[in-house]
Amino acid sequence: MTTETVQKPVAEPAPTEASTALPADTLTKYKTAAEIAAKALHHVISKAVKGAVLLDLCREGDKLIEEACALVYNKDKKNPTQKGVAFPCTLSINNVLCHFTPLPTDPGATQTLEDGDVVKILMGAHIDGYASIIGETIIIGASAASPVTGTKADLVAAAYNVAELVLRSIKPGVKNWEATDVASKLVKEYKGSIKGMEGKFNIPFEEGDVFGLDVLLTSGEETKAKAHGDRTSIFQKTTSTYQLKMKTSRSTYGEIVKKAGAFPFTLRTLEDQTKARMGVKECVQHGLLKEFDVTTTTDSKDLTAQYFATFVVTKTGVTRITPAPTFYVGSGSEIVKSEVKIEDPELVSTLARSLKPKKAKKATDGAPAS
């Protein structure tokens, strides 16, 4: 079993007040985006049953986010607030790690869910550029009457516990590699090891910063991610500049800038997807667009799990911006029965600690509050 933890800013770190706390209006935008993304995620989870078409679910997730965003922050008519999808809805099954959201013309467009599928669902929304991304793993057909056991149960439980442990290990001054080291201790409880961390290795967490925690875990012992046969459908504009030569490329790039801005997008959002396929090629070749490849494990028999949480660093730790997972909620779950028991006392103690900050005691007899 191998796993990868990623701590990366969801957007540029938000400006901070003199007290280094996140400004209230900024936090409200993050939370509003989180509520919208979470509702869309929970709706897609409710529709993710045997026979459901992946393309339909991806479309529905994006549509729900767009519709919900359209209902908020509408007072300023002269300078409308930018809002919408911060990351397209993706459903990645079994050994597919991430970024699967097909176009209607793609071979995977007709793929359906089957009982027992391990499905990673991820999506995000933003308000005024403040993005909240959320994702979790579910097992199709799982219920209290037919709970998940064995490798699938251990996989989901391990990914969940890694995410929960890392969140409880972060506070101002801690470096991202330190959080990954803590995660590696927990993965050993599941007889696994940490593969690594994406991005810069020595980033300190500071109060007021907003980050995304992305945990990817596989059941394979030495598995590596590789590009999948399905064509890439998610891209993101970079800060690079280049004078595009092809008319189709210029038209496609202009539409991307208008509709997606700096956020990842799926080609489904563009008017002519066939021309868009042609147009993005030159954009990618010259660094104007970044690709989010559909990736899989090298062994098709391996399974994968993912949890993604958006959080803000506080004075003493972190506060979730996106809500906690709902499919697997810990060792008391009636639908996921992992037989692995975490033995390390330090890990057990950390996982048992609430993420909610303790309320300050009221001052009595003139004594200052603690």
Image (spheres, rainbow, N blue to C red):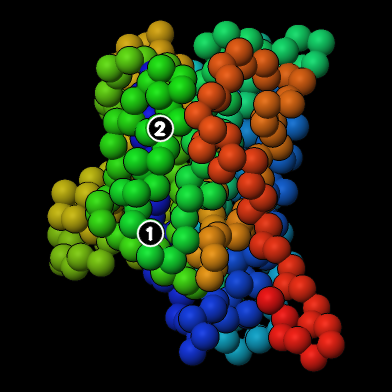
Image quarter for residue 43? Answer: top right
Residue 75: x %, y % from top left: 71, 84
In percent of the image, x 54 and y 55: which residue is there? 310
Between marks 2 and 1, how big is the CA–CA gap? 17 Å
Residue 174 numbered tag: 1
Residue topped by disc 2? 185
- Of the pair 18 and 352, the residue shown nearer to us: 352
Above or below 213: residue 188? above
Above or below 262: residue 273? above
Q: Quadrant of the N terminus?
A: top left
Circle 1: residue type: Val
How many labels were placed on the picture? 2
Judge whether residue 55 can be spotted in this image: no
Specify whether 286 is left or right of 11. left
**Counting residues from the N terminus, which is met first, the one under dot 2 or under dot 1?**
1
In percent of the image, x 54 and y 65: which residue is there? 316
Residue 205: x %, y % from top left: 40, 63
Q: Which element type, helix, strand or loop, lies under badge 2?
A: helix
Is disc 2 surrounded by few (<14), some (14 to 19) or many (20+) residues within 10 Å? Answer: some
In percent of the image, x 56 and y 16: which residue is there? 340
- Of the pair 343 and 171, the residue shown nearer to us: 343
Residue 277: x %, y % from top left: 33, 42
Circle 2: residue type: Lys
Residue 284 numbered tag: none
Above or below 176: residue 225? above
